[in-house]
Amino acid sequence: MTKTFTMTAVAEALGGKVIGDGTLTVSRVAHPGAPCGPGDLVLAMDKALLPLLTANGAVSAIVSEGAVLPATLKAAIEVGRSRFAMAKLTRLFEEVVPVAKGIHPLAVVEEGAEIGKDVAIGAFVYIVAGAKIGDGCILHPQVYIGPGASVGPGGLIYSGVRIGARCKVGARCILHFNASIGADGFSFVTPQMGSVETAKATGSVGTSSNIELVRIASLGAVELGDDVEVGANSTIDRGTIISTRIGNGTKIDNQVQIGHNVSVGENCMLCGRVGIAGSAEIGNRVVIGGATGVADHVKIGDDTVIMAMSGVAGNLTPRSLVGGVPAKPRAKMIQDMFNLNRVKGLIEKLAALAARVEALEKQTKD
Amino acid sequence: MTKTFTMTAVAEALGGKVIGDGTLTVSRVAHPGAPCGPGDLVLAMDKALLPLLTANGAVSAIVSEGAVLPATLKAAIEVGRSRFAMAKLTRLFEEVVPVAKGIHPLAVVEEGAEIGKDVAIGAFVYIVAGAKIGDGCILHPQVYIGPGASVGPGGLIYSGVRIGARCKVGARCILHFNASIGADGFSFVTPQMGSVETAKATGSVGTSSNIELVRIASLGAVELGDDVEVGANSTIDRGTIISTRIGNGTKIDNQVQIGHNVSVGENCMLCGRVGIAGSAEIGNRVVIGGATGVADHVKIGDDTVIMAMSGVAGNLTPRSLVGGVPAKPRAKMIQDMFNLNRVKGLIEKLAALAARVEALEKQTKD
Amino acid sequence: MTKTFTMTAVAEALGGKVIGDGTLTVSRVAHPGAPCGPGDLVLAMDKALLPLLTANGAVSAIVSEGAVLPATLKAAIEVGRSRFAMAKLTRLFEEVVPVAKGIHPLAVVEEGAEIGKDVAIGAFVYIVAGAKIGDGCILHPQVYIGPGASVGPGGLIYSGVRIGARCKVGARCILHFNASIGADGFSFVTPQMGSVETAKATGSVGTSSNIELVRIASLGAVELGDDVEVGANSTIDRGTIISTRIGNGTKIDNQVQIGHNVSVGENCMLCGRVGIAGSAEIGNRVVIGGATGVADHVKIGDDTVIMAMSGVAGNLTPRSLVGGVPAKPRAKMIQDMFNLNRVKGLIEKLAALAARVEALEKQTKD
């Protein structure tokens, strides 16, 4: 199932320029650090990698504009923004993992589920009545789709994904292994004021005790927009009354946790292990670095960038750049580190100054 | 499958008071921010939301005691503690996701497994010999129950949950998508003193090298009490000799990791992404904020509240309120932030004072 | 299915010395804190636990060298390094969860998959064409093995594990519940310079907006060496061009996230909730404490120990011992805490000194 392209075809897909023999064919993308065969298209957009090409047997490569090419190359493609070229190149060579069209005889599609055209449903998939699977969807083995849930056209749902009752997944979404869409929100209440409420109100737990935890059920669902990607083992909980929402084009990495009632805007990037607590509102095009936490009910403005391992405890205006726990403007965070490093010197300077003052005092007494 | 109630019936369930037409029927709970139809019961316990009711078509609402009602309402229910009312209300309208009673023909229940009365076991469920499923349990599709494991009566086990050998789940527990109960503990030993031991003993890795990692097998299991809830993709590891234990009524959010030999008391709340390292002992009614880590062997007293994103490295007395990494009393944590913010000023003040001292020195020399 | 051994046999397996009746048989390992029956072998390597043996009915125990034994014991085994003895002991008594040899009639093995000898494949397992399962592997129910993926001999794959296309798992690996091997890397690019790039280059988001996120597909795979263990719900993403690699003997705890292109060396230990961002290179025998994050492209030297809840933002030389966010040498981290604690005193001292200077200034004016 290998794909083969001429260098000219690759260049066209990438919007790049062929140098040398455009009829040369390639069938694999390769790293310059390993020995190469004739069909290998070697990535050397980083100029520092060019010298490797003379020794590894490469005959075709992708390079940055203006690169000085080794004589051993028969053909090269010059590209501009290398990471963008990489995106196009990897899409060109990507091989979709096959699932046979139709419904596998060992899948269960309950009566009353609507299945679109050209759908592939793998073995051990379970689809409950009332669910809708859009045209061209691929459901890998062992997926669960709850009652009334829907997956838009072109959806790619990997093995072990669970989509709970009434959750809506937009068009062309990709959900990776074991992602959980629509578990219940984590929401409990004590009949009287509980320990967290007391602590927030008074700064102390006092005599408060959570003797009884009463469950608030989740009547809402989860709604993912179009072109959303959700990473492996990530979890997005359903809302209490309204739905938890993820906007079009937002990409979510592995092991991200999104709480009930959260709203995430469009084209956001949430890196691995991020956690968003209940009812937070994330704007559009927000980038959240790995392992960062966002507190409940916090509002984050559009185009904000949050550094990895931060803890966002308060609202952020659009285009913020923040880091740290609690998150503060990046410049302030760096200043804080710098200031902490200066404490030792301060102690020493203060002691030296105190000695000078003491000397002066002695002199003055004399 | 919609549920319909009269306002009087809802009020009774909530312990609230009907104002207006108690015979009015409602079949959906709605948020005041969206347009409403006739069967919608609108939540407006927050007084700030009351003005929305005049414009969104609402005819019935739940409000706080003493709220001034818009004339457009035909009926309202006055409640006290609004979040507590919410719990009762959502339970009233909750619709349980159906699984057909009996054992699905595509489920496998090994001979020697005991299945209680009124049990619903979905397709692709696998139950190993020696396992016991209590009366009234619902096992959604694709669940795994290991040998000798048991689920108490009324258990609700969502798709993709794995319950390992000999683990015991109490009555009325809810386990969400892809939760893992009873994977092996993470426990290894080097034949000679390893790098972590050396670092703890000497403050340096020295020449220590973990040339061999020998596995300590997990002979214990996991025991969940009654009314425990475990979130999606959370993991609770089995103990080495004795079992890892979770007390009655404790609620665990998504992506929480609980290590081997840990003991968690009753009615605790562990928020999303919390991690509890091996052999830690958590008391009763402890609340642990999101993404917080608790170090191994640490003991945490009853009724303690730990703020989100903290790292608890030492024991905590009952009713502690702590935050930060390492966790310290909340007041101290705030003081630390405050103090760090004062360093810059200190530097400036010290420089100014030094200038004054220098001036004095010059004067004194004269 | 209980295992029974004589004390002499246990001592041989542990390399320990029998004291008393070596013919006594034991069939269970027990904790001294609970009442014991006749077949219970009680762990009391910690001398503080010895007094418990007189009261709990124990007749056989494992103790440390030189322990003074209670008269109630009929037999004991003296061992050296107790945790190492524990490893051997638990392996002796471990009972492997059974899966019937052969392919379960409700498993699907596509034509063109290669299945070794003495393999046990549970129900609802799906193995795609081109996959290879080595001799003696145990695949528990509900596992997915993608096309061209391979599991080396002696593999133990628990329920819910997903191994994506072309991923290679070495010999004797153990993969726990719901682990994900080979989901796509989280890799996107904006056609023009995006907000994170702008922030890195200029320290501000500026006017940058991630209007379009273009997906970089993952052509690489994941390669796990021999004797690797991966915890429940952990995720290891495939590489972009080359494979993400985990070295021989490395142990990975639950809910660990390893990004695309990462390379982890041999005999490392990655504790629960660790996250390694893309293209990071972890050396051999590195220990990473729970919940720690490692930034992308960072290189960590051999035998390094990283404390729990740290954030490693820069390269580390071999045998480093670091902690904190950002991670710094442990001694420096402790010094930082100490220095922060001294700020309050500094403020007071500075004020006192200022008063003395003011007094001097007054005197000097006089």
Image: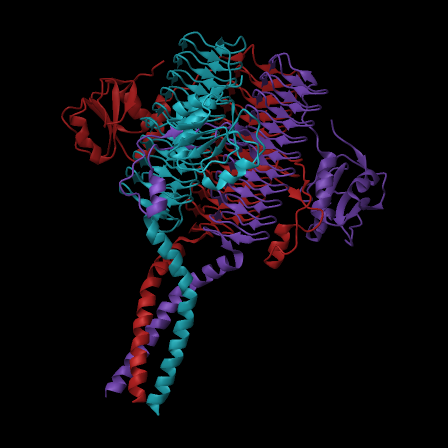
Chain colours: A red, B purple, C cyan
Q: Specify whether residue C221 is in view.
A: no
| Numbered circles on residues, count | 0
Q: In which quadrant of the rendered image does the N terminus of chain B lie?
A: top right
Q: Quadrant of residue A115?
A: top right
Q: Is residue C244 left or right of residue B166?
A: left
- Compared to residue C280, the image places residue B338 above or below, namely below
Residue B91 at x, y = what percent? 72, 36
Q: Quadrant of residue C273?
A: top left
- Compared to residue C34, the image places residue A192 above or below, namely below
Most distant residue in the left direction: A71
Q: Considering depth in this image, is A4 or A53 the residue closer to the camera? A: A53
Q: Specify whether residue A349 is in view.
A: yes
- Compared to residue B128, the image places residue C259 above or below, namely below
- Compared to residue B245, the image places residue C150 above or below, namely above
Residue C218 at x, y = what percent? 37, 26
Q: Considering depth in this image, is B92 or C293 the residue closer to the camera? A: C293
Q: Considering depth in this image, is B44 or A206 the residue closer to the camera? A: A206
Most distant residue in the bottom direction: C366
Residue A122 at x, y = what percent? 52, 15
Q: In which quadrant of the rendered image does the C terminus of chain B lie?
A: bottom left
Residue C271 at x, y = what percent? 42, 36
Q: Quadrant of residue A347?
A: bottom left
Q: Considering depth in this image, is C13 or C173 the residue closer to the camera? A: C13
